[in-house]
Image (cartoon, helix red, strand yellow):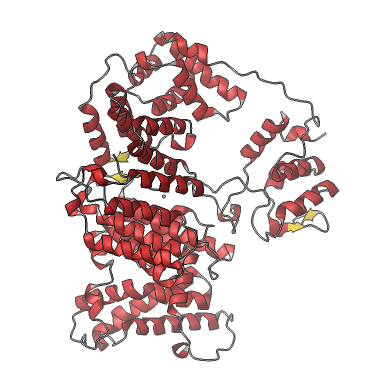
Amino acid sequence: MTEPPATAGTPDMAANAGTSGVAANVGAGGVAANVGAGGVAAVAGAVWRQESARIVGGLLRMVHDVGLAEEFAQDALVAALERWPVDGVPDSPGAWLMTIAKRRAVDHLRRTTRLEPLAQSPEQAPEPAGDDVLRLMFTACHPVLQPEARVALTLRVVAGLSTTEIGRAFLVAEPVIVRRIAGAKRTLAEAGVAYEPSAALASVLEVVYLIFNEGYSATSGDDLIRADLCLEALRLGRLLAGLAPDQAEAHGLVALMEIQQSRSAARTGPAGEPVQLHEQNRGRWDQLLIRRGFAAMLRAREAGGPAGPYVLQAAIAVCHAQARTAEETDWARIASLYDALVRLMPTPVVRLNRAVAVGFARGPQAGLDLIDELRADARLTDYHLLPSVRGDLLRRLGRLAEARHELERAAGLTANTAEREFLLARAAVLPEVGGRSLGEATAEFLGSPGVSSPATARAYGQTLSRIARVLGERTPLSELTGARVHEACQVLWADAMPRGWNRHVAALRSFAAWADVTEISGMLQPLPVTSTPAAGSATWTDSAPLRERTLWTMVRESSAPITAILALDVQDLDLDDRRAITGVVSWRSATARLLTELVADRTHGPVFLSERRPGPGRPAATRDLCPVTGRRRLSYERAEYLCKQATGGTLRRLRA
């Protein structure tokens, strides 16, 4: 069995992640001016790692801008590197840094005339350090930011890591990290959320767990585990639990990470290959981390309230940790906990984990039945653990040739070198079905005389490459059924317009005829293409979503360009005069009634929002994001598609 998949640095960094070492001796009065420049730099670095979050958080309370707060904190660090070799390290280096940074902040505020007269000097101001750090964590994890931006900003301003360390940890070039952090600061400043801790606790916990999971099961690179990221996430989790002691989910996350981290030494073999959970040497599990996890779980229970997602996942980890051998694992209990987790988080990955547990608790066929239900979920199309788990279950059922195919497909989907080699090695010991594979046949077909046009080859290649990725390039043509191809088409193109669907069908039918797999052609039928309705004839009902009804009514009532309507921002609306303050867009009574309901209590951001937040690979401009929900502006293409689906006509056809 593979370890349950995640629900979403450097060695020297890891050494300092526990805030130990040099910093432990700072402030005792024993570090004096005779420390060399290199020693002072080491002390300053250790102090910065410990104190940066408190300093930046305190400055954020003053200047209300994450970027400025970090800039002044960095100025203080530079001052320390200049003065400590001469004057000696102060008895309270953290307080020294805070004082210098606050002086820089006060000077800036006075220069920009944004400061009311100070009732007390910066040195005498109260320092609610816990509140400041908690505010900083919540701000860095605000939902308006993209997940990768939240992670980078949190590691930078809360954990105190350099951009070089963050880039190395995530195998990303340093300039990319710099851009992410700069963009995150700019987004927070422009959205006006850089001061109040307006992010939900769930967003903060999500970021910490994302960091941990990237270390625990690296998505790319040569190594399966990046211990430095795991340790940094543990440090952040412990810090958060200490600052929010009454939050059961914070303690649940700590318990989950402690217990999972306890298995790190046993998760890889001598050559770095993964070792499955039920095959691990449990004598190598770290008992200290397990006890810490149990203690965190007790604190979660003492905090009270219904069990949340992290508490439930921690309870599952506790079940594994309590079993002295793999055979003693209480799989029935784990399956029931996953049942509860699915009710709270019915995500495809949680359902996949549940299928693993059910496969052990009730037999491989029961698990396989649940897995096969997930194959139609487009969100798991490129997720390597789906075919990996399915291959395991097929192997246990004695369907070895099918199991080999699934494991090979999983290897083709993962970007992690160690995991790919592990999956291929497992597949290699299983019997292979002979004959030409789907990948080989696709390459031959695209190079055949019947596909002579470059445009046709490109279009056919796009369709067939997606099908091969879903079904597996090594799938033998002899096992390619029409039902399976049709299922893959439904996963990939269920929402395609008739013309788009028909293009994919034409490509697959041509391939089937060439490869003499006639069953495929019979299962794939083109869709009728309806004629475009006359202008102004498109209609809709009150059952259509409010967003669509508002947009369509405004398009019909306004003479403004549709792109200008989609570009409207809430802050630009003059609801009383029924126009935008820019003067480009105006509307009538029907739109006015709907628009008031659509905007509700929002004060900023796009009027028309998409259904979800932008994905990691498609960042949106700041002005196109809602500062409250993080959802992006509705695009013209998506609006056009929704209109065609509901009315049968284009947006322009709505106008008489």
**Quadrant of the image occupied by residue 322:** bottom left
Q: Up-down: is 374 above or below 557?
A: above
386 and 600: which is toward the camera:
386
The image shows residue 100 at horizontal and vertical percentages of 40, 83
Question: In the orientation shown, which residue stands out farthest toward the right?
Answer: 589
In this rendering, does residue 586 appear at all? no
In this rendering, does residue 2 appear at all? yes
Horizontally, residue 498 falls left or right of residue 401, namely right
The image shows residue 500 at horizontal and vertical percentages of 57, 24
Residue at horizontal 36 percent and vertical 84 percent from the top: 95
Residue at horizontal 28 percent and vertical 30 percent from the top: 396
Horizontally, residue 1 falls left or right of residue 442, namely left
The image shows residue 551 at horizontal and vertical percentages of 73, 43
Residue at horizontal 20 percent and vertical 27 percent from the top: 429
636 and 528: which is toward the camera:
528
> Quick one: quadrant of the N terminus?
top left
The image shows residue 522 at horizontal and vertical percentages of 51, 11
Horizontally, residue 223 falls left or right of residue 253, namely left
Q: Up-down: is 264 above or below 491?
A: below
> Quick one: quadrant of the C terminus?
top right
